[in-house]
Image (cartoon, rainbow, N blue to C red):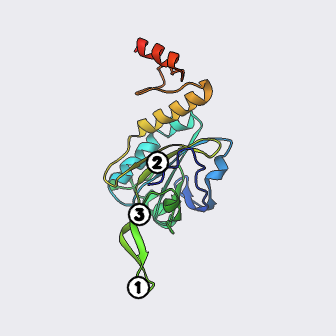
């Protein structure tokens, strides 16, 4: 598994569905450079079970991300037509109707591969035919990208393990706190706590208080 933290987020241009209904060609995260932080997350499949709980959870917290100037973008290896169909299905039926943030279609699986979240192995056999061990779908990867396009946080869960959206918000708060104040965020930090001056004296002072 590649560690992308501290590196430029891999560039891509792909089909996407935005606002729940609109198809967009050549969608790219480059549109947010210099403007917004980005939470870019992968999920395994449309029309599944854990995935809609995550997509709805991000939608329910979308206002919290937006007030922090953060764009939320989802991605899976399904087609844009599959995304669109799932977006038309009611929540009670297992659909994701009401989700408005962009959902990228990584149909050729290159985005998942470049972010190193593609589950399954593929190879060419002796007849030069492409073969795969397991399904080529994305793990539950999440990447927090700053305004310069640098990955500052990443988290990758196995397929059955849903993520905590509140933790994603906490990491946004931590990054923005560091950017504004220049202080580090210690263990279990949240937005109502003080930061940590990254010196021996600062650590000693923090530990005395806590």
In the picture, the disc for residue 142 is: 2
Q: Is residue 162 left or right of residue 185?
A: left
- Residue 149's place in the image compared with 122, above or below, is above
Q: Which circle's residue, 2 or 3, is located before the other in the chain?
A: 3
For mark 1, does the 10 Å Cα neighbourhood hold few (<14), some (14 to 19), or many (20 or more) residues? few
The mark closer to the camera, 3 or 1, is: 1
**Which residue is tagged 3?**
137
Q: Are marks 2 and 3 in contact (CB under 8 Å)?
A: no
Tell me how far mark 3 sits from mark 1, CA to CA. 24 Å
**Which residue is tagged 1?**
126
In x, y percent, where is residue 131?
A: 40, 77
* SS label for mark 2: strand
Q: Is residue 15 left or right of residue 164?
A: right
**Residue drawn at (47%, 21%), measured in percent from left and top?**
192
Residue 58 seen in this snapshot? yes
In the picture, the disc for residue 66 is: none
* SS label for mark 3: strand
Residue 88 seen in this snapshot? no
The quarter of the rendered structure image containing the N terminus is bottom left
**Residue drawn at (34%, 53%), measured in percent from left and top?**
158
Q: Are marks 3 and 1 in contact (CB under 8 Å)?
A: no
Q: Which circle's residue, 2 or 1, is located before the other in the chain?
A: 1
* SS label for mark 1: loop
In x, y percent, where is residue 151?
A: 56, 45
The mark closer to the camera, 2 or 1, is: 1
Front residue of this view, candidates 19 and 37 = 37
């Amino acid at each position: 598994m590649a560690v992308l933290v501290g590196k430029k987020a891999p560039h891509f241009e792909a089909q996407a569905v935005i606002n729940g209904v609109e198809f967009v060609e050549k969608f790219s995260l480059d549109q947010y450079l210099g403007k917004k932080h980005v939470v870019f997350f992968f999920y395994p499949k449309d029309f599944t079970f854990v995935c809609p709980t995550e997509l709805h959870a991000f939608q329910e917290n979308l206002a919290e991300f937006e007030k922090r100037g953060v764009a939320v973008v989802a991605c899976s290896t399904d087609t844009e037509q599959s995304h669109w169909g799932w977006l038309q299905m009611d929540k009670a039926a297992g659909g994701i109707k009401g989700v408005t943030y962009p959902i990228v279609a990584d149909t050729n699986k290159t985005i998942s591969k470049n972010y190193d979240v593609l589950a399954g192995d593929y190879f060419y056999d002796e007849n030069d035919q492409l073969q795969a061990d397991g399904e080529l779908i994305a793990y539950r990867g999440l990447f927090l990208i700053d305004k310069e396009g640098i990955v500052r946080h990443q988290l990758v869960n196995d397929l059955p393990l849903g993520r905590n959206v509140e933790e994603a918000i906490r990491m946004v708060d931590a990054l923005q706190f560091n950017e504004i104040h220049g202080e580090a965020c210690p263990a279990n930090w949240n937005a109502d706590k003080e930061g940590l001056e990254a010196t021996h004296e600062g650590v000693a002072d923090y530990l005395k208080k806590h």
